[in-house]
Image: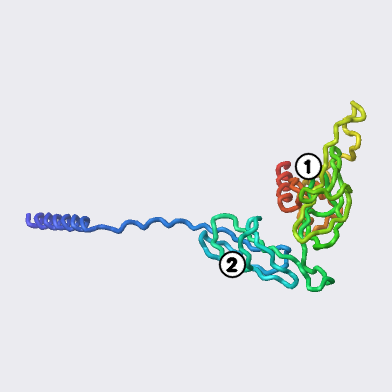
Amino acid sequence: MKRLSFILCCLLLLCVGSMQAQGDFNPDPPADPQTPVFYYPLTVTCTPEGGAYVSGNGNYAPGTVVTVSTSPKAGYNFNHWELNGATYEATITSFSYTTVAGQMDFVAVYDFQPNDPDEPFMDAKSRLYLTSEPAGVCTFNRTSGAWVQADQYVSVDITGVDQLYEFTGWYLNGMKLTDEQAFNHLMGFHDETLVAHFHELPFNPSSPADPSMAEGQTDVQTHATGDTNEDGMVDVADAVAVINIYLTGNTEGLNTGLADANGDGVIDMADVVYIINVYLNNQ
């Protein structure tokens, strides 16, 4: 009986202690979750390419103060800054910029002015893009987007035309340059896009039973878009050919019109992706 009384007293004491401990337990509230921080790329380049040094490139959280700066190489004079394609307010070569949550592409624009009028234009190069209006109706003698020495003449020609269209002239920035299909273009100090304009020929078959040809129309392009090597198949070999054109600019034995598989007027890795997708979908 005494043992039972002792055990009951111990249990009672344990219950009282536990209740007191529970009454004293008051943990701190959990910490508020942290707001995630996003970083946005800021790029700094110059035009003409190679005409100056630049700094400030990186990935930054919005509100970060970054020093954007440029310094010219010999023969180049600073003109102005551009931000996302528009003229930027800064008029000096180095300034502080507070980053934002969005696109931040700075371009330092320079003029090339050699001290000696006979000094060659050593590093001044720009890209020359070739396209057509409507898009994809012709091919060209050179790779669209290739680098060209500034203030030098470059030969531009059309090597193949869709039979349903007729050439009407070359245009630059909406202004007509020439009616000649092949001509020598004087390259400027900024990237340029030459547009070959065409109009659609009226359908006028020589015979009702033979609608394949119309007056003024030429050969029909029988190869599929992307068949760069014109072997009758769109496959990995065509993708490799487009990569070689993109990296080296060498188009010998290849059809640049078919290489521009997505029809955007530029031969690049997007055309490689297009060709691979065509190849995989046909398997």
Taking depth in this image into account, of 269 and 164 the one nearest to the observer is 164
Check the image and report above or below for 66 versus 194: below
Residue 100 in the image: x percent, y percent?
A: 54, 57
Q: Residues within 10 Å of mark 2 (few under 14, many from 20)?
A: few
Q: Are marks 1 and 2 in contact (CB under 8 Å)?
A: no
Instruction: List the residue tagged with mark 1.
Output: 134
Taking depth in this image into account, of 263 and 147 the one nearest to the observer is 147
Residue at the extreme left of the image, as rendered: 1
Q: Quadrant of the C terminus?
A: top right
Q: Quadrant of the N terminus?
A: bottom left
- Disc 2 is placed on an element classified as strand
Residue 76 in the image: x percent, y percent?
A: 73, 69
Query: Spatial distance from mark 1 to mark 2, Cα to Cα?
Result: 43 Å
**Left or right, 8 with reference to 100:** left
- Disc 1 is placed on an element classified as loop
**Left or right, 67 with reference to 258:** left
Check the image and report above or below for 160 versus 113: above
Taking depth in this image into account, of 128 and 86 the one nearest to the observer is 86
- Quarter location, residue 206: top right
